[in-house]
Amino acid sequence: MRTAMMGAAALISVGGYPHAAIAQDNQIETIIVTAEKRAADINKVPVTVQAISGDDLARQGIRDVKSALPFIPGASLAGETSQGTQVYQLRGVSTGDTTGDPTVASYLDDFPFSIPGVPFAAPSDLFDLQRLEVLKGPQGTLYGSSSLGGVIKVVTNDPDTSAFDVRAAASFGAVSEHGYDYSADLMVNLPLDDTFAIRGVMSGKHLSGYSFVPALGIRNGNNDDTVTGRIKALWQPTERLSFLVSYWRFDDQQDFTNRMDGYDPPMINDVGFGKSPTSFSLYTGKITYDFDFATLTSTSGYISRHNGLTANGCQIDTCFVAEIPGTSNSFVQEVRLSSNGDGPLHWIGGVYYQYGESSSNTLFHLTGISNPDIFIDGLSAVHSIEWAGFGEVSYDLWGGLIRPLVGIRYSSVKRNLIQNSTTTVTSVPPVVVGSSDTQAGKNYHLNPRFNVAIHPNDNGMVYFNAAQGFRPGALQTAANVAALQAVTGVVTDIQLKTDSLWSYEIGTKWSLFDNALNVNGAVYMIKWDEAQYQTGLSGIAGIVNLGDVSGHGIDLQIAYATPIPGLILQASGGWNSTTIESINPMITAGLPFLHNGVQVPNVPKGNFSLGFNYARPLGYRDLILIADATYQYRAKESDLATGLRSGDLNIISFEIGVEKDAYQIQFFADNITDERGPSLWEQGRMIVPRPRTLGMRLSFSPEL
């Protein structure tokens, strides 16, 4: 039974549609999400949220968030130095690729992967995942700062006290013109009694490099090896009380980076060996108590993260040598109380605290033809303390026909930048900028949310949502500001202004024809004031207040469980126009290709996906045939540093295999046409899709 449901489910979920499983009678079953920090049917949540089940991600061979984003309307990769440093954008709200706070909040279970001045999303392996949730639009009231564009939540399986369980998977793939990918995963769930259980997960993978490094005679330059693991322990001494603790470890070792100097073939112009490692350790705890009328939840977490960059290469008309190690730490505590029951009044309220710090030691030498030589020797550290109180309340009118909601969050963010750095520009005469002081910044913000949901019947809803999000103003060193001006001509500030964003959205969700057809759609507009963006070139990067931005767009998802047993059709897509409305004149002076009316950098105008999934019994020894195919399209986007535009992406993938009881074997072809892109430009270098890969996946998941 389980395998038949999985086989029919996979495409519709992974294809960006927010449902988890297709039953054998071709009805689309809904999934429970925690988008509003309480468990709810996804079709009853009055915001645009997508959820993809962990089983479906595993069956499609999707191992990370980046691989799932092409199926999500309005989402795309905005930056990627290496495998552990991805940056994402939602609905046209983008940011920098290496520095500055993110615009999309990233969560591992209940822990916000938020580190001051670091835009990277949470890197994690998605094996033994419960679901992936993507919330679109500002989520400031419940999720706080740096959620202007939305929230991405990786929700893993908790220990199960009822039964022993084990799962295993392995894969192997041949990368066109290069080496081989391979991976192995194992999960063990061990209940010690009916109140206590432990769940452990271990994963390892090797990704073949696909870049040529001519100066060093290397064919597979950006090889990558990742080892991840987590262990969770659950104790439920009573039906009301539970304790959950976990430890996570992520360790990624990558040669060179994923930034290319050529894309056909992919090529890196480095003249010395490079590396870009990333690792973190995460400790979390969660306590819940059910008071009948409400549930009290306390979540705590501490993360220690390390990253580095060693590079020696040339780009456009400049060459550089860089050694940049960095460390980050963050402690987060949240306590919230949310209402229970089926009454008309629903509410949630809580308090939030975060202490974070991020430091780096930069040794950088840039030589150029058109630019002066630049030497940077700098140490900087950012310390941040945030306090917040938040709440939302809603009430069912006329038996639930209409549910108005209002929410608010008050945040206080205080940051200090400690700097000891020197920048030397070898102009005539030479310019030396030194800084060895402390900069302080304070940000106070009130984030409201207003929502009205209309439920004309049990099959659908229409909702209006207006919400605000914000980011604290960034702090950067005087030496960095001087280097940015020398390379790009852009004048910026040590302390930037806070940016804030209002979003207005009308959406609808419908399940029709006995839940065989599901349609979700939304139209939205945004107003983004003092947008903070990163720019730079050849390793020199800084943050600017770009100016005011406005945008509008549409998201649409359709899934149809056809009358043909086991055949599912799916389509999803998004379009947006997000343009600069009032640019900072100092930005145009240095980057003349940026002006009012142009699409903001790192944001494609649109993306969509088409696909089918088919599952049917073969009539031989209980074997089930499974097959699916997907087509992904993503439009061009531009680089803030150079104005260079990426290519249109057209990627086709296909899978076919069989299932029997606890076993599954699949043969896959990813990026069949060997699309080269490039996917995007970053500071004059480019990111390209992984080359065509042919391979096989095996999985074992017995029903014990």
Image (cartoon, grey):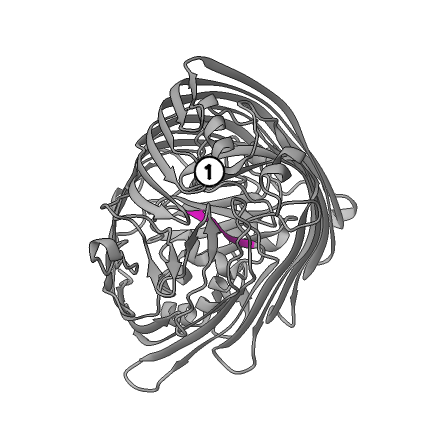
> Which residue occupies 49% across, 63% down?
13
Location of the N terminus (image quadrant) = bottom left
User: Is 464 positioned to the left or the right of 599 in the image?
Assistant: right
Furthest toward the right, the residue is 398
Q: Determine the image quadrant of residue 99.
A: top left
Percent coordinates x, y for residue 615 in the rendering: 42, 77
How many dots with numbers? Answer: 1
Percent coordinates x, y for residue 102 in the rendering: 51, 38
Percent coordinates x, y for residue 411 in the rendering: 59, 24
> Which residue occupies 34% across, 32% down?
364
Of 366 and 338, which appears nearest the observer? 366
Of 199 and 119, which appears nearest the observer? 119
Furthest toward the front, the residue is 428
Of 465 and 434, which appears nearest the observer? 434
User: Is 698 positioned to the left or the right of 70 in the image?
Assistant: left
Residue 657, relative to residue 541: is it above or below? below
Of 398 and 393, which appears nearest the observer? 393
Q: Secondary structure at mark 1?
A: loop
Reading the image, the residue beneath label 1 is 119
> Which residue occupies 55% across, 52% down?
638
Let me know if residue 117 is in the magenta part. Answer: no
Location of the C terminus (image quadrant) = bottom left
Percent coordinates x, y for residue 700 in the rendering: 25, 64
Furthest toward the bottom, the residue is 619
Look at label 1 and name its amino acid.
Answer: Pro
- The answer to whether residue 596 is seen in the rendering is yes
Furthest toward the top, the residue is 437
- The answer to whether residue 231 is seen in the rendering is no
Q: Which residues are magenta?
A: 75-80
Let me know if residue 77 is in the magenta part. Answer: yes
> Which residue occupies 33% across, 76% down?
657
Mark 1 neighbour class, 10 Å CA radius: few under 14, some 14 to 19, many 20 or more: many
